[in-house]
Image (tube, grey):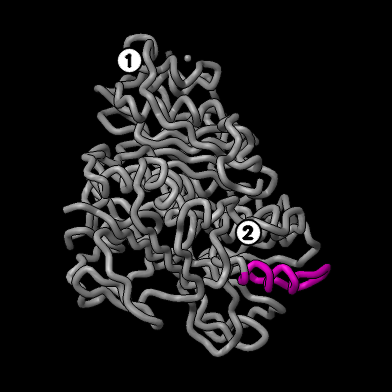
Amino acid sequence: MRVERVVIAGAGLAGLRTAEELRSAGFAGSITMIGAEPRPPYDRPPLTKKFMVGELDDTTLAADPAALGLDLRLAEAATGLGEAVLRTGRGEYPFDALVVATGASPIGLPGNGRQRFLRTLDDALELRSALHQGTRLTVVGAGWIGAELATAAARRGCRVTVVEAASTPVAAALGTAVGAWMVPWYAEAGVELLLRQPVESVEPGGLALPGGGWLAADQIVTAVGVRPQTGWLAGSGVALANGVAVDERLRASVPGVFAVGDCAAFVSRRYGARLRVEHWDCALHAPEVVAANILGGDEIYDPVPYFWSEQFGRMVQYAGHHTGADRLIWRGDPAGREWTACWLSGTGPGDGAGPGDGAGTGDAERLVALLAVGRPRDLLQGRRLIAAGLPVDPARLADPAIAVRDTAGGGGLCRWPRIRATPVPAQCGGMCSAAIRRSPERPGCPVSPAPAAPGVSR
């Protein structure tokens, strides 16, 4: 079928990039982009970083809707989907192709007190104005957003407490073996970290804790995760599975419907799983595949996921997907400021508890993910090594003096796989030297085993 009308539900980075890619590919038909927020597309990552400390006031993406021939409808949320028609509270929009890019919304806690979130620009504006010298800020959740917000608030002179139900920060994302080494970062920054501390409810003036406990706070921010914003698709026939279930070409179960960004759960050949990636890099590049396939292409989306986080004076970068990995080895001492954790799939020794786990010979072990703290070159080379899918020598990989690229089986990678260079904002720490496109801004392990991280037994 000839595509002449494209409707994009969602006016964030993923939606805007879809429109740009369609035009770049020569699409001359109509593009209507509908966004629930009243603001034009903006960049979210700076909201917890430079924006929150007052070093940046505008994160609007540099795009000209008129130049794109884009019919941009703001403050208008998608409410339903009929046969080749998108419904909103203001009307209906027929389409030949629909791109669902409605993102995700934060998960709240029970209770009658005010809990803030940090998802939108308006959220960030309100929170920034409420944070002053001495403000008692409590952040529920020691994940990526919670850590970045705690970092910014401490810089603003707030008295910051982070409450986390798990035994370490970022336990759900990275596991406790890695998260344990991040525990000391909080105290170094003057932030109180309460671990293994569930919250019963948010009440006026503080948090109600189990057993009658109470934690007073002037401001409370809930950062315990998000849910894909797909409720409006109920009854539409679009299959949902922790987001819009799409195939490797980002096509939904209903013909003519695609999904990108935080709300898209895509099939990955590389990892043999359905993934939903809530990160900027996915929103940046997935639209290239969607646009090509809307216009009759047969492109497959199977990235090596990537994200970065700035917290407590450290640049933290991650690439890959480690669920199902067989073991974890270390490059460098995680008690220091520069180290890398590497997840391998294949057969090999080691329990991943500390940097002593690294020696040994694996049977065709492959790098599937890595977390680099202050080692951007490890990240860049590791991401390419994951994309190549070549076996690695674990003993050489555990030696921080050997370049990651030189740990591949056969003595290193002679030819790198081509990976789209990810333009990263200045705050990324220089992983990629390219300017952001549209944002305002070597046998054995030579490292002696380190002691177990504070408060965590091996």
Tell whether 447 sits left or right of 292: right
Residue 398, given in percent of the width and then of the height, sits at 46, 24
Q: Residue furthest right?
A: 133
Please give the name of the residue rendered at 56% of the width and 63% of the height, measured from the top-left corner: 40
In this rendered view, identify the residue nearer to me: 141 or 275.
275
Residue 144 percent location from the top left of the image: 54, 55
Residue under the point 52% across and 71% down:
37
Q: Position of residue 12 (x, y in %)?
A: 48, 59
Question: Is there any visible trace of residue 342 in the rendered image?
Answer: yes
Q: Which amino acid, mark 1?
A: Gly
Q: Residue at x 53, y 70 (%)?
A: 197
Secondary element type, mark 1 = loop
Q: Quadrant of residue 389?
A: top left
Residue wearing tag 2: 47
Spot occupied by residue 165 in the image (x, y as percentages of width and height) = 49, 67
Give the distance between the C-alpha atoms of the residues marked 2 and 1, in whole angstroms: 41 Å
